[in-house]
Amino acid sequence: MANIEEYLLWRGDLTVQQAPFNNVDNLILSNLSYLIFKGIVPELDNQKQSFLDKITSLFKSDDESHMQYITVHDAIASMNLAAEGKDRIRVSQDIQMGIKLAQTKRFGNMKLMCYVDKYDESIETQFAAITVLMEDKTAYIAFRGTDTSLIGWKEDFNMSFMDQVPAQKLALSYLKDVASIIKCPLRVGGHSKGGNLAVYSSLYAGKEIQDRIINIYNNDGPGFKSSVLQTEEYKQIQQKIDTIIPQTSIIGMLLEHEEEYIVIKSNETLIMQHDPYSWEVLGPDFIKMKETTSSSHFIDTTLRNWLNDMDSEKREKFVDILWEVLGATKAKTFTEMAESLFANAVKIGKKINNLDAESKEVLSTALSMLIKSAKNAILAGFK
């Protein structure tokens, strides 16, 4: 069945002025943020300085000549696959997709600007974002989801007990900075963690920016702690959020959501449905489903009850110990870990054996609670 790659053949020759922006375009642009554009796309810090030079000059022109950008076509053509960060490319298919969309009339002439890419182990954050200016005089702000780095995944787990992780703080700052530079209507989105960042940044950006936002796209990204969903800020933007999940969503069902889901068909199973290339497309939209599958309900119930049974302190201890164990491999990415899978499994086993009694108890209790939660979800399904 067709996916976003086939969509380029159907829609690639039409600009967004000829065929309006849609949900599939959103996924493609959010996926574009996974590519490493360091040294290619003008960075946000340089853009901010250029903007300040412009507004403090004697000239009062409203033109956008002060903006620094590069077209999608030229950015892809300039990519150096041997450059720093290559090991953090999510999947090689992202590169091939970038090459294909750069050749289309619809995406090739879109302008890329305000690139940011931060990776900091000391504060446990992995964050990247890029802004896309389109011919319909709107902009799409794309937040990168979790890459292959262990730190990126650690930050995802931190969301279960932290009110604000560093990437969320950076996303909010990024949205405010970009909104001060460009004055057009905005779309904000991302895939996986990037979807969470899109919602979070829009949530706290303030009414002036929120009024400029057309849509907020959360493409199979996790939700939030329930306390966030009860705020007035969330209620202000809830109607603008499009949460898109495959029929057996796992990542997108993590934590809490209040908004309605758009459930779509995937040609993969279980966790592999998180892959955006598995999402089925027909014409200008995804193939929609009435509801998520029973497998998704089971996983959602299991994980939700498991997290509810642990307070924030227990979640934090479990996550820290789990990453301490994984750290025994010295791997920086899951790709590195998989390259020496047997040797790393031995290192992990030794590390677990060498943990102190309290740490072993934390791991054992958390895993026992997960098994119990799964059993309860199965029993509830038979009632």
Image: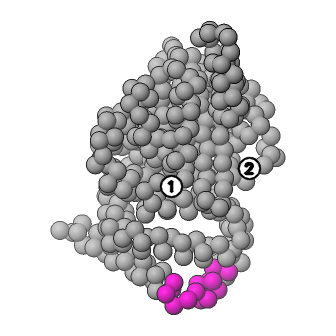
Circle 1 sits on which residue? 165
Observer able to see residue 360: yes
Mark 1: secondary structure: loop
Q: Is residue 39 above or below residue 152?
A: above
Q: Identify the mark at residue 348; answer none if there is no mark.
A: none
- Asked if residue 35 lies left or right of residue 371, the reply is right
Quarter of the image for residue 285 reads top left
Q: Which residue is found at the position 48% from the left and 74% from the top? A: 317
Circle 2 sits on which residue? 85
Q: Point out the residue furthest to the left here.
A: 383
Classed neighbour count for the residue bearing mark 2: other residues with Cα under 10 Å, few (<14), some (14–19), many (≥20):
some
Q: Which residue is found at the position 54% from the left and 40% from the top? A: 173
Q: Mark 2 is on which residue type?
A: Gly
Nearest to N terminus: mark 2 or mark 1: 2
Observer able to see residue 71: no
Quarter of the image for residue 342 reads bottom right
Residue 252 position, x and y percent, is 42, 51
Query: Real-space Cα distance between discs 2 and 1?
Result: 22 Å
- Is the stretch drawn in magenta largely helix, strand or loop? helix
Choose between 222 and 91: the one closer to the eye. 222
Q: Which residue is found at the position 29% from the left and 69% from the top? A: 377
The magenta span reads 347-360
Residue 106 position, x and y percent, is 59, 21
Q: Is residue 357 above or below residue 103?
A: below
Membership of 356 in magenta stretch: yes
Q: Mark 1 is on which residue type?
A: Val
